[in-house]
Image (tube, grey):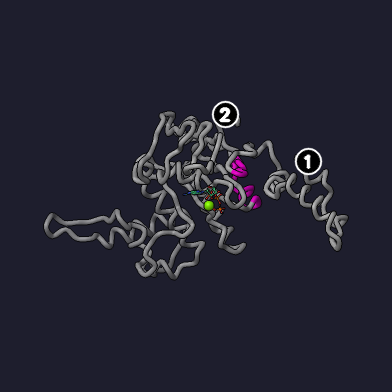
């Protein structure tokens, strides 16, 4: 892991806040998590910097969700250190993470499908007007603000009254990203935002991942897909069986190498060896072992 002061995209923030000098907002040092006897995560190092997208890749069960649960305050680490702005922390609830500016967009997108877009945007943080006891929701203000914030991120919806459940999966992800930005997130965690989406919609979501990065947020982008990761990523961390198998800056790894890592080069070579003992499989058709284990 290097300590670059600028992102691949050359973004250097002008602020003097901790974000301003590219120091990590969130950092894990040799961190781990055991669920009873099960060691889900072990020896993980990760740094999330402002204006950078940190991609976390890994197969099913690799520990990706466990990692983000620690950062988002759902679970606590049992080994190593977890730092926010350089200070050790141990969150008991997601609210504590949110108070530090760490927002998480889950794949199943919490929200009320039948409620309008603007209502979902402000859910739990509604704007009100008028003195007590005749305080009421400031609907016009909320509609206007939601529309403006979505437009700032480049999302134009025809009707703020549209129930959020009628938006496409990609649009809903984008609304959730814009909402996190509006409510002051400094770190945005996205758990497999493109997993259930087609090519076009994935492209739309990746565009807003880049938009959040350009607004100075540190983004943690969880994905199975090395192609999606490589389109927006500044740093790539690959988890395998709970440990960090690879941690590389964009300048140090090609898309091909990343894809090979995700495909599990060494495991594929072993599988090929097994298959060679089974009649009916033409192993000559499979990629060369040296190609698979090149990394
Ligand atoms: N609450 C829990 N109790 C016990 N074991 C758990 C718990 N949560 C996760 N694990 C185990 O920890 C390991 C990592 O799981 P995790 O959900 O973090 O993987 P993942 O990379 O998110 O996988 P997927 O891609 O399938 O979502 C798995 O072996 C899993 O069975
Ligand atoms: Mg998971």
- For label 1, the SS is loop
- The picture places residue 69, in percent across and down from the top left corner, at 46, 46
Is residue 255 shown in magenta? no
SS of the residue under disc 2: loop
Rate crowding at label 2 as few (under 14), some (14 to 19) or many (20 or more) other CA atoms within 10 Å: few
Q: Is residue 143 above or below residue 241?
A: below
Quadrant where the image shows the C terminus: top right
Residue marked by disc 1 = 294
**Labels 2 and 1: the sequence-earlier one:** 2
- Indicate the position of residue 257 as horizontal and vertical percent values: 72, 44
Q: Which residues are magenta?
A: 226-241
Residue that appears at 64% across and 38% down: 246
- Crowding near the residue tagged with mark 1, few <14, some 14–19, many ≥20 C-alpha atoms within 10 Å: few
Question: Is 237 one of the magenta-colored residues?
Answer: yes
| Residue furthest out toward the left | 133
The answer to whether 96 appears left or right of 274 in the picture is: left
Q: Is mark 2 within 8 Å of ligand 1?
A: no
Image quadrant in which you'd find residue 283: bottom right
In the figure, residue 55 lies in which quadrant?
top right
Q: Tell me which residue sits at (49%, 57%) in the image.
A: 107
The residue identified by callout 2 is: 3
């Amino acid at each position: 892991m290097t300590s670059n002061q600028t992102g691949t995209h050359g973004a250097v923030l002008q602020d003097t806040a901790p974000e301003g000098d590219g120091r990590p907002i969130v950092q894990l040092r040799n961190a781990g998590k055991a669920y009873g006897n099960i060691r889900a995560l072990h020896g993980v190092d990760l740094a999330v910097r402002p204006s950078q997208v940190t991609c976390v890749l890994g197969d099913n069960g690799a520990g990706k969700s466990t990692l983000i649960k620690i950062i988002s305050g759902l679970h606590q680490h049992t080994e190593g250190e977890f730092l926010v702005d350089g200070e050790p922390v141990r969150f008991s609830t997601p609210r504590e993470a949110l108070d530090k500016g760490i927002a998480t967009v889950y794949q199943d997108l919490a929200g009320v499908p039948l409620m309008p877009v603007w209502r979902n945007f402000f859910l739990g943080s509604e704007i009100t007007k008028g003195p007590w006891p005749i305080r009421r929701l400031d609907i016009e203000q909320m509609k206007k603000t939601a529309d403006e914030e979505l437009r700032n991120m480049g999302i134009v919806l025809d009707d703020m009254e549209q129930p959020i459940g009628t938006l496409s999966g990609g649009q809903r992800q984008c609304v959730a990203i814009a909402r996190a930005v509006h409510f002051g997130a400094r770190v945005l965690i996205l758990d497999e935002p493109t997993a259930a989406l087609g090519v076009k919609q994935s492209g739309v979501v990746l565009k807003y991942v880049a938009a959040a990065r350009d607004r100075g947020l540190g983004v943690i982008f969880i994905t199975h897909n090395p192609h999606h990761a490589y389109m927006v990523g500044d740093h790539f961390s690959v988890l395998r069986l709970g440990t960090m198998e690879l941690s590389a800056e964009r300048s140090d790894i090609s898309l091909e190498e990343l894809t090979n890592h995700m495909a599990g080069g060494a495991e594929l070579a072993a599988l090929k060896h097994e298959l060679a003992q089974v009649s009916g499989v033409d192993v000559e058709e499979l990629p060369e072992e040296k190609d698979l284990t090149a990394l």
